[in-house]
Amino acid sequence: MGTRITESMAQRSILRDLVAADRNLALTQRRLSSGKQLTRPSDDPFGVNRAIALRGELEGTRQFRANVNEATGWTNATEAALTRITDVIQRARELLVSGGNDSNGQVAREAIATEIDALAESLKQEANATYEGRYVFAGTATETPPYALGASDAYAGDAGTVARTIGVGVSLTVNVSAAGLLGEGQAAADDRLLDTMRDIAEHLRGGTAADAEALRGTDLERLDANLDELTRVRAIVGATANRLQAAGARLDELEESGLDLLSKTEDADMAETLVNYSTQRAAYEAALKAGANIVQVSLLDFLR
Amino acid sequence: MAVSTFTGLQTALRGLLAQQRALDVTSHNVANANTVGYSRQEAVLAASPALRIPAGAVQGGGAAELGTGVDVAAYRRIRDQFLDLQYRAQAMRLGGLAAQVRGLEGVEVALAEPGENGIAAQLGKFWSGWEALANAPENQATRQALLESGVGLAGSIAALDRQLATASEQAAAEYESIVAGGGEVGQMAAEIARLNESIRSSLGSGSTPNDLLDRRDLLLDRLSALAQVSVTDLGDGTIEVEFGDAATPLVAGTAVSWPQALAEPGGKLGALLEISGPTGTIASYRADLDAFAGELAETVNAIHASGGGPAFFSFTPGSAASTLAVAVGAAEVQTSVGPAAGANDIAIAIGALRGGSADQAYASFVSRVGTDMSNARRAEQNADALTAAIDARREATAGVSLDEEMTNLIRFQRAYQASARAMTSFDEALDVLVNRTGRVGL
């Protein structure tokens, strides 16, 4: 006689198959309802490791995007202030040219000097520009206004750089120190904007031929040099803004591709999972049906 | 020598009795068709000793032997002891792997990876907190947010460590409850010793106690799921049972030696010891977690304190995971080496730790737990399938098949009827001899 098959063997094997089918079905159901292929580290240890790394990178990318937004805000505030400073200097240059013209009398020159003083004051005001409550031209002394309004032209900020991280290991300096543009006034004799403006006002008020000569000669040259410097700084800030914009676009792409990768690693393929689900359900029902039928009949039914 | 007139009656009677016994055994089999551990039995029929007729029994004057019917030679238990050995070896593996899977399942669930709430995600948020602080070092709100994410991260690491410790304690407690004096092992050992006693006395009086043997085999099956079991037949029907790596046999004849110390018993007990031991799986997970927490605290602290400020995290080396805590208040969070309000070099440097050694240590920890768990699951399913296959082979030999028993029932019933018919025909023959012979003309 070959292998004997007993009733309890058949019952046990049906039960085992039912349990196995049920387990597969439960796993597929979990994948369907959570939408995730990976719900536990043991589902696929390598895949989970990858998913954790991808999630970390994605979080980093999002933070870099936030950093870029912040830096862009800072740069925009800087650019706007520099534009206004340029306007002020343009106006000062017009005044200087007209003040250097001998057709103006001393009274008119005095009036121009007063306006130059006011412009110097508004220069300081512009240099005190803020972004979200922080002084953008004060180096890292962001809580101190770089210039006090009034007679003193001393720079109250520091020479520190404000940096923002816009990528792994990529740090970008976003600030411009006002000290390099406006300088520290006549006391420092540094030929920067405030020094120049104060000298111009002095020369306008002086009224001598030498003063008039200075207005037409050195003062104009110095103001033009300051304007050139300002243009150079604005070019740098503009370049920073461009770099930020490019970095932002790249980070957006990175986030998108990171999400895509994460989804491919972690998410269940719905079509495949659904097909698996129906196949497994069919197998489960078949096993149930077999269980209901097979154990019913025995020799007993045919003996009289 | 003549043969007794009634020999035929006696032969028919033996037939009736033997077929009746065979029917009894069949009925016993059917009744126990669903009894766990039962082996089907069989009445072994053998021709009874023949009646020797010395001389003149056959033509030519020679001697002969006349058959006298049938006897039940034995009631045999149909079972393959070799399959029992195979089954027990697999049952031990399965018991160990199942205990391992159940013991570590909690650890895996506690990780909550991959997900939004796991430590990996909190770690990411923590680094982002530093970068947000680097964007606005002047801002109190970002400091507070950073501190809170640091406190949350340290709390989650400590909570995971506690869950690991609990899993280990649960395994140790389960081990204790099984090996304790009145526990599962002790009870089964005592019952095996009692069965040894009964089996020995049954064998002594010449009978084979099939059902007691079945019961003892079942107990050995159950014991083997707990630990490595090896059985030695002592010859008088009793057995000696070696259990795990216990120094003295668990059962020797009718003597029980329990409780005893076990080091690597195999089976479920072995797995529980392996999970909860001082150098076991969970202890090494906790060591990994400590190494990760220490790495996190040290790398952050080294940068945080580089400007002469305080350490960001406090922890006790050796139990970093359970003691990790944020050691500074919002005002003490260092954003830069210098005092300038807008400087952020420290915050940037700590933010740049993202994806560094701490992150990698944690990821490889998760990966290790996952790999262990997935290997254990796969091995458990294999062992389960193997155990089931061996059990099916055992069942093929020892299990009760109702169809077969029904067939036997018919067979024995017919033989019984035929024996009765034989008896009737003798009766009729004797009737003729006793009541009618010599009554010619009456």
Image: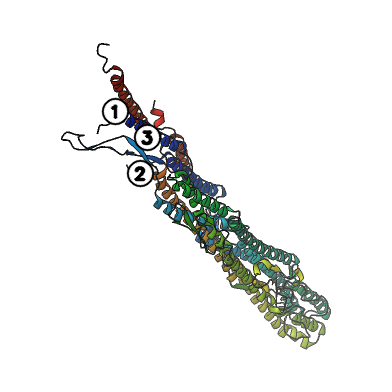
x, y percentage for residue B435?
A: 31, 18
Which chain hosts label 1?
Answer: B
Residue type at numbered disc 1:
Thr
Residue type at numbered disc 3:
Ala
Residue on which disc 2 sits:
A3
Q: Determine crowd level at label 2: few under 14, some 14-19, many 20+ residues with C-alpha closer than 10 A.
A: few
Residue on which disc 3 sits:
B18
Q: Determine crowd level at label 1: few under 14, some 14-19, many 20+ residues with C-alpha closer than 10 A.
A: few
How far apart are the two marked residues, 3 and 2, measured between alpha carbons? 28 Å
How far apart are the two marked residues, 2 and 1, measured between alpha carbons? 47 Å
> Seen in the image, is A93 located left or right of residue B281?
right
Which chain hosts label 3?
Answer: B
Asked if the residues shown at circle 3 and circle 2 are in contact, with their CB atoms under 8 angstroms apart, the answer is: no
Q: Quadrant of residue A119?
A: bottom right
> Seen in the image, is B116 located left or right of residue B95?
right
**Nearer to me, B407 or A96:** B407
Q: Determine crowd level at label 3: few under 14, some 14-19, many 20+ residues with C-alpha closer than 10 A.
A: many
